[in-house]
């Protein structure tokens, strides 16, 4: 009787471990992302890509929070760089370390910006090149066949891009794993920081396609505790958005 050899089970992508003490006061707990049964389609790796997908409102069939999205995605890239050990907090400033270069081209571009300029406050990097970052994240998602981008004209005059999701199940699974961090039964100290970062950044920007107004109210204390774990990017994003609001009102 012939002996059949079974292939080993496929494993999810292994996240790079951050260095000890990366992001002062930030406890980093890393887990592998689950492999989702979506054929050949996999969840996007970067936090910015995940937030871009979550900013899409399936009910309305369009991208929301466009005025805030650039700042949110820049903040997400900075959190990713910090968690991967490429950037550290140095007395309120983002300082490049000697971590392995990120595979994500958007994160790599932001890292090169930081390296060229030197340590600056986190908000400085959140306020820079938001529109360009949105386009770069969008283009990477389009290349990965996760979204479809079609040029069109608003009112037949204004050029714009129409964005649609190619795989709605991807958005569903990203949202589910992110919102799972709000369950009271899960210890804050054991929540995966990548999922927590998505929820916290979205709540900070009032991105209601991720965290509804009711959820922000009910989980106010838990969101505050998760924000402490995520680190200095969160208060910097909050100040940046507040300043934009004041400037628009004034």
Image (spheres, helix red, strand yellow):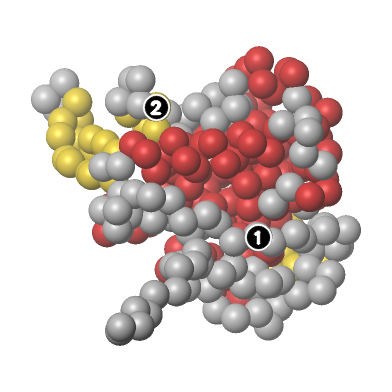
Tell which tag, 1 or 2, sits nearer the viewer: 1
> Please, is residue 95 above or below residue 4 in the view?
above
Number of disc labels: 2
Q: Position of residue 110 (x, y in %)?
A: 53, 65
Question: What residue sits right under mark 1 in the picture?
Answer: 31
Question: What residue sits right under mark 2 in the picture?
Answer: 57
Under circle 1, the secondary element is loop
How many C-alpha atoms fall within 10 Å of the one at disc 2: few (<14), some, or many (≥20)? some
Q: Tell me the quarter of the picture where residue 206 sits.
A: top right
Of residues 113 and 47, the one drawn nearer to the viewer in this rendering: 47
Q: Residue 48 — which label?
A: none
Work out which quarter of the rendered image holds the C terminus and state it.
top right
Q: Position of residue 55 (x, y in %)?
A: 45, 35
Q: Earlier in the sequence, mark 1 or mark 2?
A: 1
Work out which quarter of the rendered image holds the N terminus and state it.
bottom left
Q: Tell me the quarter of the picture where residue 217 sits.
A: top right
Mark 1 touches mark 2? (CB < 8 Å) = no
């Amino acid at each position: 009787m012939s002996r059949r050899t079974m292939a080993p089970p496929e494993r999810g992508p292994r996240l790079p471990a951050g260095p000890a003490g990366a992001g002062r006061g930030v406890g980093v707990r890393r887990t592998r992302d689950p492999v989702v049964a979506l054929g050949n389609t996999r969840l996007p790796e970067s936090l910015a890509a995940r937030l871009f997908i979550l900013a899409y409102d399936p009910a309305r069939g369009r991208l929301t929070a466009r005025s805030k999205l650039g700042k949110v995605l820049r903040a997400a890239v900075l959190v990713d760089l910090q968690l991967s050990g490429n950037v550290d907090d140095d007395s309120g400033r983002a300082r490049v370390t000697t971590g392995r270069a990120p595979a994500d081209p958007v994160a790599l571009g932001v890292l090169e910006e930081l390296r060229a300029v030197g340590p600056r406050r986190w908000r400085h990097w959140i306020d820079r090149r938001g529109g360009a970052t949105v386009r770069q994240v969008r283009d990477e998602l389009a290349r990965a066949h996760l979204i479809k981008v079609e040029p069109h004209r608003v009112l037949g005059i204004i050029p714009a891009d129409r964005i649609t999701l190619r795989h709605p199940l991807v958005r569903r699974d990203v949202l589910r794993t992110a919102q799972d961090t709000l369950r009271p039964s899960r210890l804050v100290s054991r929540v995966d920081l990548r999922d927590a970062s998505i929820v916290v950044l979205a709540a900070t920007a009032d991105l209601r396609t991720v965290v509804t107004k009711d959820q922000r109210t009910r989980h106010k204390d838990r969101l505050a505790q998760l924000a402490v774990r995520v680190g200095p990017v969160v208060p910097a994003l909050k100040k940046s958005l507040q300043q934009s609001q004041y400037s628009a009102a004034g």
